[in-house]
Amino acid sequence: MPVLAETLEMPVYVVTAATGQLGQLVVRHLLHRVDADQIAVVVRNASRATHPAEHGIEVRVADYDDPASLAGAFGAGDRVLLISGNQFGARLTQHANVIAAAKSSGIAQLAYTSILGGPSANFPVADDHHVTEQALLESGLPFTLLRNGWYTENYTSQLTAALHHGAVVGAAAPASRLATAARADYAEAAAVVLVGAGHENNVYELSGDTAWSLEEYAAEISRQTASTVPYRQLPPADYEDFLAGLGLPTPMLSVFTATEAAIDRGELADTGGDLRRLIGRPTTTLAESIAAELAELTSR
Ligand SMILES: NC(=O)c1ccc[n+]([C@@H]2O[C@H](COP(=O)([O-])OP(=O)(O)OC[C@H]3O[C@@H](n4cnc5c(N)ncnc54)[C@H](OP(=O)(O)O)[C@@H]3O)[C@@H](O)[C@H]2O)c1
């Protein structure tokens, strides 16, 4: 009888950082695939998890920084998505805390949002991901590495500024290319690997179907806004001054210029198709993402 009960028990699909932009989208995609009582979210602030709570999703409170709180965050057999934290440096320990808690709880799968290219991604944002991937492999847990490329929203969220300045400003060369995808595309892929079979111990290099250049990006904004918005490449030092003028914290300035250099090396331009294959449809195009952001700006 206990064997039968165990066999029939459905896994719980657990999303950490579910109050963030990616996490919210993953939860929405999970709701399309499984019942709400099969989903749980792990958040550090329950008052920000109103959407999951309203849908009958279990809300578990834990902070990546607090191992004691994480001890109750996972259950045996859970299929867990660890969404990487947003505090560089600090997130190394945070991820280690989550992996340790997941390991002692006996979860069935730990999927992790890493960086496109994994160990070959050679820029500061990737460093914490390299170490976390290694920790996950060494944990012995069934893992899934979701090596996410750049979100298109990293660019489109700056559309207002580009229109204000009359230019898209960066340090990468105008012809350098990126194969971005919409945040929602990556979120759907995460939901797919949690609920689907056979994704354990797999690595996915996730990126958009088409690599676009920065001058093409500026040209598409110009076309959709019927204005002239060129791409303006600045020397790295001038670009850092520009970012400082926008209010970016000083320690992040070199991180941004190093990422521009990685873009020049083609490190975010992979179009291998793993994302399209996981979600079973083409990834959201650059033009669609620009149109969506412009529509959002107009509706405000
Ligand atoms: N590939 C890319 O282009 C790209 C771009 C941006 C970010 N990222 C990475 O992808 C992750 C998700 O992106 P996003 O857009 O959803 O970021 P986001 O909107 O900034 O969300 C970050 C999430 O992390 C949670 N969090 C932060 N510190 C935590 C802690 N100590 N304990 C528990 N939860 C914590 C936040 O919780 P609260 O709601 O309580 O703050 C929030 O839910 C980011 O954290 C970052 O690692 C990737």
Image (cartoon, rainbow, N blue to C red):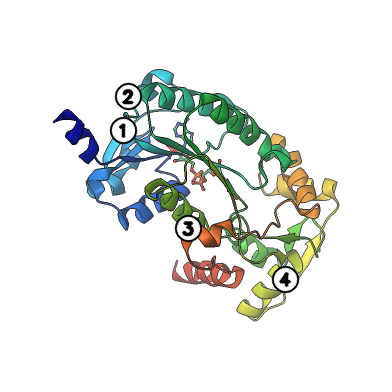
Locate residue 281 relative to residue 105 in the image: left or right: right
Q: Which amino acid does label 1 sit on?
A: Arg
Q: Nearer the viewer, mark 2 or mark 1?
A: 2
Q: In this view, does 44 lie above or below 194?
A: above
Task: Point out the tag, 1 or 3, that comes first from the N-terminus.
Answer: 1
Does residue 286 appear to the left or right of 169 in the view shown?
A: left
Please give the residue where the numbered disc 3 appears in the rendered image: 184
Quadrant assignment, res 66 = top left
Q: Upstream in the sequence, badge 3 or badge 4?
A: 3
Amino acid at dot 3: Ala
Q: Position of residue 114 (x, y in %)?
A: 58, 41
The answer to whether 91 is drawn above or below residue 248 in the figure is above
- Real-space CA distance between mark 2 and mark 4, rounded to the nearest whole angstrom: 48 Å
Residue at (47% x, 54% y) in the render: 189
Quadrant where the N terminus is found in the figure: top left
Residue topped by disc 2: 72
Between circles 2 and 4, the one closer to the viewer is 2
- Sequence order check: which comes first, mark 3 or mark 2? 2
> Where, quadrant-wise, is the C terminus in this rendering?
bottom left
| Residue ID for mark 1 | 60
x and y percentages locating residue 232 in the rendered image: 79, 63
Percent x, y of residue 234: 83, 56
Of pointers 1 and 4, the one earlier in the residue sequence: 1
Pointers 2 and 4 in contact (C-beta within 8 Å): no
> What's the CA distance linking mark 1 and mark 4?
44 Å
User: Do labels 2 and 1 touch, CB within 8 Å?
Assistant: yes
Measured in 3D between alpha carbons, the distance from the residue under mark 1 to the one under mark 3, in whole angstroms, is 23 Å
List the residue tagged with mark 4. Answer: 216
